[in-house]
Image: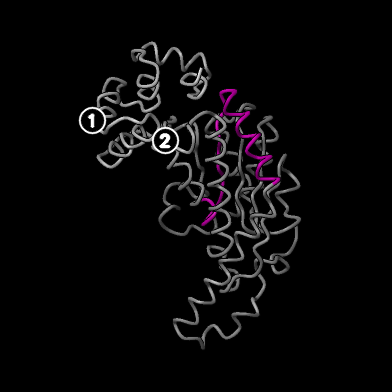
Amino acid sequence: MESIANLATEQQNEKSARLDEMSALEIVTLINGEDQTVAQAVGKALPSIAEAVEVITKSLSAGGRLIYVGAGTSGRLGVLDASECPPTFSVERQLVQAILAGGRNAMFEAIEGAEDDMQAGGENLKNISLSNRDVVVGISASGRTPYVIGALKYAKQVGASAIALSCNLSAKCSEIADVAIEVETGPEVLAGSTRMKAGTAQKMVLNMLSTASMVRLGKVYKNLMIDVKPTNEKLVDRARRILMKAAGVSYDEAAAALQAADNQVKVALVIIKTGLDAEEAKARLKAAGDFVRPVIEE
């Protein structure tokens, strides 16, 4: 396995060689300048990101699950993205999951040794009954994290789709994966601190993977989150405003439709646009594969 010392993410950044002598404004200006290179690096990986979206969409359409696996910052970013999917897209919590090396406690405190346990990566996937319908996204800034490599190897062993997300080129985990996403973010302002540019890049890519996949699954109409789950006051208000924009109705009309649809925004939209009752709207959506546009524009 390649030495950590040779990885681009471990090199010293010449621009920050005097970091300890800089003023606060100089430090944050430098960090901001380096952060602006991240989107460009992600842009170069768009073809592989799109390929991964297609793999994820196919898996979820066939009844599979999306499983993020990572250690440290990479794993925590997976947890963050997975936890946002149920309220944003009204999917079951099990559909998009994240497994973090070291378990739940590692979300709140560093358990650094956990990332070196290659066997645990596979065992943790075995514990959730990973199957060939699922897709595993291994997240590793270095691209060589043993825990992630173990998880990807197990995924391949059971026939699940394997996607690798790393921030170095020719990453070790890429050799195992069906789809390799390599975002070359380069040396960090603080050498080796991959919670910085590498972490930002991973967050951007994970946003793309989950959002684009949900769009492809019919969870969005136009650019509106019509499957949002209105579980608090803010989200109830958002759901009503979504209906106002999508259907051209008043706030009160949107509220009434939402109540009739048992707080399901997508069903409420069909009720407004077609005049169907809730049960008929649900049946029509089911027949259309849960996509709104063909139902309301037929």
Residue 229 image point, x, y percent: 36, 33
**Label 1 crowd bin: few (<14), some (14–19), many (20+), radius 10 Å:** few
Circle 2 sits on which residue? 86
Tell me which residue sits at (60%, 59%) in the image: 39
Residue 286 image point, x, y percent: 48, 16
Q: Quadrant of residue 189?
A: bottom right
Q: Amino acid at mark 1?
A: Asp
Residue 147 image point, x, y percent: 61, 49
Q: How many marks?
A: 2
Q: Secondary structure at mark 2?
A: helix
Residue 42 image point, x, y percent: 64, 55
Tell me which residue sits at (62%, 44%) in the image: 119
2 or 1: tag closer to the N-terminus? 2
Residues at discs 2 and 1 in contact (Cβ within 8 Å): no
For the residues labelled 2 and 1, the Cα–Cα distance comes to 26 Å
Residue 61 falls inside the magenta stretch: yes
Tell me which residue sits at (52%, 50%) in the image: 75
Name, please, the residue furthest toward the bottom: 21
Which one is nearer the viewer's eye here, 274 or 191?
274
Q: Which residues are magenta?
A: 47-75
The relative height of residue 170 versus residue 237 in the rendered view (above or below) is below
Tell me which residue sits at (41%, 38%) in the image: 88
Q: Amino acid at mark 2?
A: Pro
Which one is nearer the viewer's eye here, 124 or 12?
12
Residue 16 falls inside the magenta stretch: no
Answer left or right for 275 relative to 134.
Answer: left
Q: Which mark is residue 252?
A: 1
Which one is nearer the viewer's eye here, 57 or 67?
57
Answer left or right for 4 relative to 266.
Answer: right
